[in-house]
Amino acid sequence: MHASLPEVDPLIARLAEAIAPTLTPDTVVVGVHTGGVWVAERLHALLGCKLPLGTLDISFYRDDFSRIGLHPQVKPSNLPFDLEGRAILLVDDVLHTGRTVRAAMNELFDYGRPASIRLAVLVDRGGHELPIRPDFAGLVLDVPGHQNINLSRLDDGHLTLTLA
Amino acid sequence: MNPQLTQDGRLRHLLTLDGLPRAILTQILDTAESFMDVGEREVKKVPLLRGKSIFNLFFEPSTRTRTTFEIAAKRLSADVVNLNIATSSQSKGEAILDTVDNLAAMHADMFVVRHSQSGAAHFIARHVAPHISVVNAGDGRHAHPTQGLLDMFTIRRYKGAFHNLTVAIVGDVLHSRVARSQIHALTTLGVPEVRVIGPKTLLPAGVEQMGVKVYHDMAAGLAGCDVVIMLRLQNERMRGARLPSAQEYFKFFGLTPEKLALAKPDAIVMHPGPMNRGVEIDSEVADGPQSVILPQVTYGIAVRMAVMAMLAGGATA
């Protein structure tokens, strides 16, 4: 199944359209490193959010740490706002097992108690292992477990999806 | 084969900075940067080392190092047990490896070792089971790698990079494990000019072979420096024949505002602590605007978290 994947920018535009009516002024957008941050940056701009963008690196919350160790390139998490009582739009590029989202939610709660968390993903590829489903998905696919779907960013900032 | 690294090049123990590749040092500093904000959050913990048991084995007294190791382990959610020589069976004559074996039987995952004998941490590292990591928290005159790393972290935070710096280490280099770790780290990270300044009696013979320039005069040694690292002058050295008196030492090698003015105007002043005010450093400098001595302590927690996190993960794989 090497069918060509759709362009990313229209997918993000569609995501933003779906999210826009549900957005409250105090909603903060938080992207998960690395691909989720790229998508979150675009959404943040398209949605005209006033509050700064948040970023999360979930390396310190992964459930496979004792098996595979620390990711060699951990980036700092940056949440430049008080989370207490806030509505959070959590953004990732690809939803697969759901373990990244679980780790991200655990980390968010260590910063405070948000009023709500909703999940937006560019691609829901299936293969969920936890009861975690996106509130917004740009694209829903059923990708076999041995294949990987990846978001990459070219030097000019252009985002592309690849299946391998 | 470096006993500190696994076959695939990951950190297995941290015993010395001598021979550790630049990539590993940089990875530790980058990881520490990510841990910096944990201490400022609502929950000052990450769950990384949940269920791991870390034993602080301090055969030599220490307040700051032991405390920051303990806080670092707790912020990683590990369980920490502190053992001090005065209250342990060592005073009853138990051999060091028997102590280690007993603690291993209690399912220890990591030992943080401070000992007055050079090589103690290596000795324990060679002995322990494959899933146990050892961190050297200072052994004799040999090495104090986490102190060296937190000093590099401090320099990088204030100066941004290493490739354009002149760094001076001042004082009792001869007896200093801190200085040795700093010199290894500075040269590995690409600092083009590392100087040591001190009286002949307190500089090791052949120290030039470590890649440093030797000065016996503060005015010449401090000129143009970006970073000035003061070392603690240990009181017991003054009782020996190496120095005439503390006053005499302060006059020639103590860092006063006048001497600091010879370095670059934006030079930072570091000290591993505990300080002897009025011996190696003037209070006006220690508490002055160029001093980064207290930030060093704060950074020490993030750096020790990084080291422990890198050691503990994937160790059983």
Image: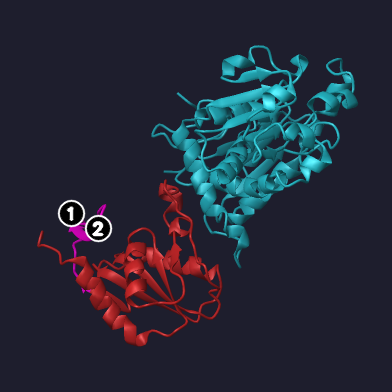
- The hue of chain B in the figure is cyan
Amino acid under disc 1: Ala
Q: Position of residue A5 (x, y in %)?
A: 15, 64
Q: Nearer the viewer, residue B60 or A164?
A: A164
Q: Nearer the viewer, residue B8 or B156?
A: B156
Quadrant for the N terminus of chain A, please: bottom left
Q: Residue at x 64, y 45 (%)?
A: B300
Q: Position of residue B62 (x, y in %)?
A: 76, 39
Whether residue A160 is in magenta: the answer is yes
Q: Residue at x 59, y 45 (%)?
A: B158
Residues tagged 2 and 1 counted as in contact (Cβ below 8 A): yes
Checking the image for residue A150, the label placed there is 2
Query: Label 2's element?
Result: strand
* Residue B177 appears in the picture as rendered: no
Checking the image for residue A164, the label placed there is 1
Magenta region, residue range: A139-164
Total numbered labels: 2
Tell me which corner region of the image, top left, top right, bottom left or bottom right, holds residue B203: top right
Q: Residue at x 63, y 30 (%)?
A: B224
Query: Are discs 2 and 1 located on one and the same chain?
Result: yes
Q: Measured along the vertical axis of the image, is residue B2 above or below residue B27?
A: above
Tell me which corner region of the image, top left, top right, bottom left or bottom right, holds residue A34: bottom left
Q: Position of residue B313 (x, y in %)?
A: 48, 47
- The hue of chain A in the figure is red
